[in-house]
Image (cartoon, helix red, strand yellow):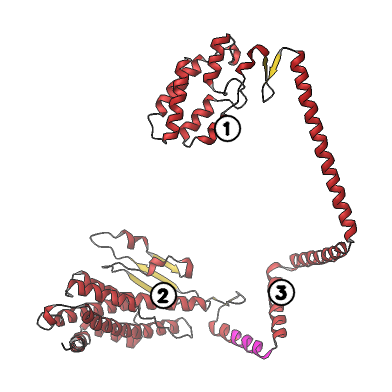
Amino acid sequence: MNDVAPILLESVQKCFDKWFYTDREVKEIYKKVRKGTATFKEMKRFSERAGAILVESLKATFSADKLPDGKLYQNIAEKVITPMLEQNHGLINEVCGYVADDLNKAARIGTKAVTAVFNADKAETVAQIAANYGEVVPGNKAAQLVENATMSMVDDFIQANLEFQKKLGLVPQIQRIYHGGKNRCEFCASLQYTGEYNGPGMPSEIFRRHRDCRCTLIYKPQKGPYQDPWSKAEKDDYQKLVTEQRKYLTELDKMSAGERRFERNAKARAQRRTLYGPAEWSSRKAQQIIIADNRASGKEYRAITQEKILKEKDAQKRIRKERAESLVSVEKSTKNAIIKMQKAIDFFAGPNGKILPRKYAKWIGENMYYKYMQATEGEEAKKYIRTAYRKTSIIGNGGTADVRRFEKQTGINLGRNNNNHAKKVEDLIRQLEKSLMKPMSDKDRLFLESELAKLKQVR
C-alpha cells in the first residue's frame, strides 16, 4: 500500500496557507506587527486563529474518501499533524520575536528575543488522540488539543524570554488575564497575576492551560533599574551595565590565575565594606585579629608534650573511678540502713521508698503504670491509664481496682481527706463503657475489658 501521508500533508498545507493568509483578522495583526504597535494580546489572538484554521484544514483533508479504509491511522496522524504544529510553531515564534524586539527597543533594552523550543512530545500526544477519535472536527477533544497546543506556543515563547531576561539581571513583568465566561474556571481564576516575574519563585502552573482555556498571558520588559548578577548592584542604564561587565570580564581574561583570585577577593572585600559601613567594618576586622591570635595560641597548646596529656587523662580516669566506688558504697550503706529500720520497726518499705505496716506487706506489688502505657496503642486506653493508675502507688499494680480491694479488706481508706475510692470506681466504670463504644485496636479493647471486669468486682 502506498504511503498517503505526504499527499495528505501537502493538502493540509495548501488549505492552511490559503485560509490563513486570507483571514481578515490575521491580516490586521500583521499590519500592527509591521507598524510596531502589536502586543502579546494580539499574539494570543494570532495563535487562536492559527489553531482554528489548522483544525479546519485537517477536517477538510481527513475525509473518509481520502483516508485508507476510511480510517485515520496513528502513523498518518503523526506524519501530518506533527509537521503542521511545527510549522505553526515557526510562524508564531517569528511574529512573537518581532513583537518582543519592539517591546525591548521601547524599554531601551539592547537584547534580541530568544525563540522557544518546539514541544515535540505534546505534538505526538495530540496526533495519538486524533488517531483514537478518527477525525479532527471543531469542538471534539482532538480539535481542542490542536488549538491548545498552538496557543501554548505563545506561552512557551513568553516563558523563555522571561527566564532569559531574569538571568540578565532585568525585572520583566508578566500578566495572566482570566476572561471568565458562563462556567467559572477555578483553576484559571486562581492563577490571575500581574507583576514582576520572579523566576523559580513563580508557580509553574502560570504557564499552563487546560484543554479549552482562553486565558491571555502578557509579557512586558521592564525599564530598569537593572541588577548586576555578580555585584548585585542596580543600574539605571542597561547598556552601561553590559559595557561594565564586558570590560571587567576582558580584564580578568588577561590576568593569571593568582591575579584573578586576588582581584575577585578585593572586589568582594570592597563590596562588604560598602555593605557594613565604617564602624561595623572596623569591628569585624578587630574580631578577625582576635580569631587569628586564638589560632596561634591553639598551635602552641597543641605543642604540649604527649606525656603531659596522658597524665591528665589518667588523673581524670582515677577521679571517675573513685566517684563510682563511693557511690556504690553509699548505695550499699543506704540499703543496709533500710533493712535495719524494717527490722527495728514493724513497717515494710515498697520499691519506691513508701512504707506500710508489716502486716500489709503482701499488698505491696509492682507498679504497672509505665508498662501499660508502653503496651497500649490508642489514646482511649492511655487516657484510662493516666486516670486509674498512680505512678507512685505501691498497692498492688498501682491501679484503682487494687486500691479499692485493699480498702474493702483492711478498712483503711487511702483517698484524700480519709475518703475511699468507691466514687472513683463508679466514674471509671462509666468512662470505660463509653470508651469501649469507640473504634480501637483489638489489643486495647482486651485490656480495657479486663480492667472493666476488675472494677465491677470491687464496686
Q: Is residue 143 visible?
A: no
Give the residue pinned by disc 1.
Answer: 370
Which image quadrant is residue 51 in? bottom left
Local secondary structure at mark 3: helix
**Magenta region: which residues?**
244-255
**Residue 65 % position (x, y):** 9, 82
Relative height, residue 312 to residue 337 (above, below): below
Which image quadrant is residue 300 in? bottom right
| Residue 62 left/right relative to 204 | left
Q: Residue at x 38, y 81 (%)?
A: 117
Q: Do the numbered discs 1 and 3 sit on residues whose CB atoms are within 8 Å?
A: no
Give the residue pinned by disc 2.
Answer: 159
Mark 1 residue type: Tyr
Frontmost residue, 342 versus 220: 342
Relative height, residue 141 to residue 92 (above, below): above
**Residue 53 % position (x, y):** 21, 80
Relative height, residue 23 to residue 137 (above, below): below
Mark 2 residue type: Gln
Mark positioned earlier in the residue sequence (3 or 2) = 2
The chief SS type of the magenta part is helix
What is the CA distance from the residue labelled 1 to the residue labelled 2?
61 Å
Frontmost residue, 397 versus 431: 397
Mark seen at residue 231: none
Local secondary structure at mark 2: helix
Badge 1 density bin: few <14, some 14–19, many ≥20, Cα 10 Å: few
